[in-house]
Image (cartoon, helix red, strand yellow):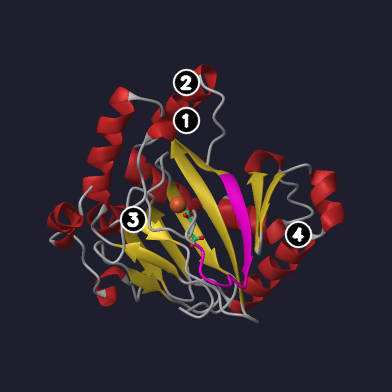
């Protein structure tokens, strides 16, 4: 798509005012779902208490340990400074990872998801991604660094386990862009497989804002909104966990897609 066309489509709908997507109070599940529907994202700064953050970091270390990784058998993606473990929540041992298991079985998240998708229309945090990014020398342009929307729509409960700003990979977000992207995704899904959907957006034509926050910050976002991991300076790192809540409708589309193609979900 030509740059000017992109600007026309996106500029008027993107709201980069951080205050308007940041909540100073614990919103009710319904209010949270409404905020995500309107803006694509809502941020709860340092919402997780420091002791729990410390426990989550301990469990993060354990899950990253090569021996534990091999024993649990979860899929690990590794790419030059990025390590991502795809945990299937129902196979996570709560005795080994009690804080992580409790975080992603959280009743508030369940109620947010019910308000977002409808009661019974989703699978709460069916996957948990444990993700570690170290130095990204030279700047990375591939996913998840490029500004994009996910080909498979997901409601994500994203947690920073380290203090995070533009120096160590703060996620960029384009609040408000979920409406246009959803339309583009649904149109594309009518014509082809999920993997064929063009989902990378040009920067800076499409503006974004860094989501910064102390360790324990949680943000809820719909991956139809443009987003992308930030670059990490030498000597710094970023640790995150995110719960992926899919609608049953999307899980069905993914299953159908997998049955007709050899594509791996991304
Ligand atoms: O790691 C990030 O900041 C972004 C990851 C991403 O693209 C996603 O969660 O869909
Ligand atoms: Fe993404």
- Please provide the residue range marked out in magenta: 127-140
Between circles 1 and 2, the one closer to the viewer is 2
Q: Earlier in the sequence, mark 1 or mark 2?
A: 1
Indicate which disc residue 226 carries: 3
How much space separates mark 1 and mark 4, taking CA atoms? 27 Å
Q: Is mark 1 within 8 Å of ligand 1?
A: no
Indicate which disc residue 64 carries: 4
Q: Is residue 43 left or right of residue 260?
A: left
In front here: 74 or 32?
Answer: 74
Q: Earlier in the sequence, mark 3 or mark 2?
A: 3
Q: Earlier in the sequence, mark 1 or mark 4?
A: 4
Q: Which residue is mark 1?
A: 251
Q: Earlier in the sequence, mark 3 or mark 4?
A: 4
Between circles 3 and 4, the one closer to the viewer is 3
In front here: 31 or 189?
Answer: 189
Relative image position of residue 256 (x, y in whole percent): 47, 20
How much space separates mark 2 and mark 4, taking CA atoms? 32 Å
Indicate which disc residue 155 carries: none
């Amino acid at each position: 798509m030509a740059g000017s066309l992109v600007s026309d489509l996106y500029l008027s709908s993107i709201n980069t005012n951080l205050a308007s997507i940041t909540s100073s109070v614990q919103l009710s599940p319904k209010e949270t779902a409404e905020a995500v529907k309107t803006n694509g994202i809502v941020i709860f700064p340092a919402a997780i208490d420091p002791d729990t953050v410390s426990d989550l970091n301990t469990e993060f270390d354990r899950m990253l340990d090569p021996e534990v990784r091999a024993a649990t058998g979860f899929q690990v993606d590794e790419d030059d400074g990025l390590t991502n473990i795809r945990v299937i929540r129902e196979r996570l041992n709560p005795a080994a990872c009690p804080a992580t298991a409790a975080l992603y079985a959280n009743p508030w998240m369940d109620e947010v998801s019910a308000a977002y998708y409808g009661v019974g229309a989703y699978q709460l945090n069916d996957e948990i991604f444990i993700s570690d990014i170290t130095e990204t020398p030279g700047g990375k342009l591939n996913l998840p660094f490029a500004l994009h929307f996910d080909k498979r729509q997901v409601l994500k409960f994203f947690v920073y386990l380290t203090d995070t700003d533009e120096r160590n990979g703060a996620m960029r977000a384009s609040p408000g862009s979920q409406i246009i992207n959803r339309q583009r995704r649904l149109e594309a899904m009518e014509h082809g497989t999920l993997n064929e959907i063009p989902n990378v957006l040009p920067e800076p034509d499409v503006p974004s804002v860094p989501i910064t926050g102390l360790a324990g910050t949680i943000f809820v976002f719909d991956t139809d909104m443009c987003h992308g991991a930030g670059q990490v300076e030498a000597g710094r790192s970023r640790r995150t966990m995110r719960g992926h809540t899919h609608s049953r409708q999307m899980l069905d589309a993914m299953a159908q897609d997998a049955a007709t193609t050899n594509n791996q979900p991304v």
